[in-house]
């Protein structure tokens, strides 16, 4: 049953980026989607903004992060939740630097140990002791928080971290009440499928129609959607092979391509 916002805690969720690792338009490509003037076909790398009870939480820090935060007028980021450590999901990390400066506090980064390892290697300067001779704000103020599959409370919001597989790479999806977000996935373990029932909105990876070794295709995503039976499903991490309106015309009525700026709601008891 749909959770009435008047009787439950609810948050707004904005899909700031819904594109694949290249972003759309893709550099060097002149296909009709990359040349499209329809803004629904303009896709930044995957990133989500959640207006949590105690601040702004974002899922992943893609290379487009600065432009996305400006576009959606996000003046503070209070915490980050990471799905995995691929480049298109982490390489905007330094764009968090002004927020630690303005808030005068460390920004918690919630991630699995494998992600922490990559972050501390790729951004070693950001996790070293502050140089007292450096000017204020020279390096980000960050704090790693270990995450694993299971429940966690972040910024006053209950989240269930879900084990997914991105090819052979373990990744995390996230459920907040009647909403779930599962990007970069090619297989959902049985124990995770049981945690994805009873949803109002499911956001799920669907790269293209053709099979891919590390992402769901559209047909594979539809199979999962048919199994889980959410009220609505939104396909994300979309490549330039999928035109927004053309693809939507071929999908079931309760399934649509997501688009940058799509705003949804998550409610919990």
Image (tube, rainbow, N blue to C red):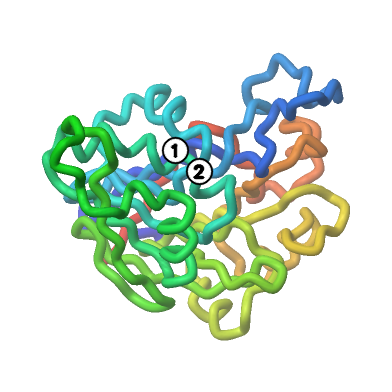
Is residue 186 at least partly visible in the picture?
A: yes
Using the rendered view, name the quadrant where residue 241 is placed. Answer: top right
Look at the numbered disc 1 and give the secondary structure of its residue: strand
Q: CA distance from mark 2 to mark 1?
A: 24 Å
In the picture, the quarter occupied by the C terminus is bottom left
* Residue 261 relative to residue 265: left or right: right
Side of 261 where 240 appears, left or right: right
Q: Secondary structure at mark 2?
A: loop
Q: Residues within 10 Å of mark 1 (few under 14, many from 20)?
A: some
Residue depicted at 32% across the width and 57% down the height: 109
Residue 154, x across and y down, in percent? 25, 61
x and y percentages locating residue 259 in the rendered image:
59, 35
Residue to which mark 2 is pinned: 91
Q: Nearer the viewer, residue 107 or 6?
A: 107
Q: How many marks?
A: 2
In the picture, which quadrant includes the N terminus? bottom left
Q: Is residue 62 left or right of residue 34?
A: left
Q: What residue did someone put label 1 on?
A: 263
């Amino acid at each position: 049953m749909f959770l009435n916002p008047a009787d439950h805690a609810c948050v707004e969720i904005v899909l700031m980026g819904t594109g694949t690792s290249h972003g759309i338009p893709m550099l060097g490509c002149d296909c009709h989607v990359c040349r499209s003037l329809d803004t629904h076909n303009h896709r930044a790398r995957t990133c989500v903004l959640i207006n949590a009870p105690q601040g702004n939480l974002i899922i992943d820090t893609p290379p487009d992060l600065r432009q996305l935060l400006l576009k959606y007028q996000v003046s503070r980021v209070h915490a980050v939740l990471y799905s995995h450590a691929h480049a298109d999901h982490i390489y905007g990390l330094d764009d968090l630097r002004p927020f630690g400066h303005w808030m005068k506090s460390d920004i918690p980064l919630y991630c699995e140990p494998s992600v922490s390892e990559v972050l501390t290697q790729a951004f070693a300067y950001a996790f070293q002791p502050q140089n007292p001779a450096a000017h204020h704000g020279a390096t980000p103020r960050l704090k790693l928080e270990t995450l694993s599959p299971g429940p966690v409370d972040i910024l006053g919001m209950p989240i269930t971290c879900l084990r997914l597989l991105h090819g052979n790479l373990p990744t995390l999806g996230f459920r907040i009440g009647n909403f779930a977000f599962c990007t970069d996935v090619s297989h959902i373990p049985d124990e995770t499928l049981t945690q994805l029932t009873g949803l109002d909105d499911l956001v799920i990876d669907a790269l293209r129609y053709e099979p891919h070794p590390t992402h769901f295709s559209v047909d594979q995503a539809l199979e999962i959607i048919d199994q889980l039976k959410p009220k609505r499903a939104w396909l994300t991490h979309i490549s330039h092979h999928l035109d927004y309106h053309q693809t939507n015309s071929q999908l079931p009525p309760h399934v649509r391509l997501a688009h940058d700026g799509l705003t949804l709601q998550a409610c919990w008891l």
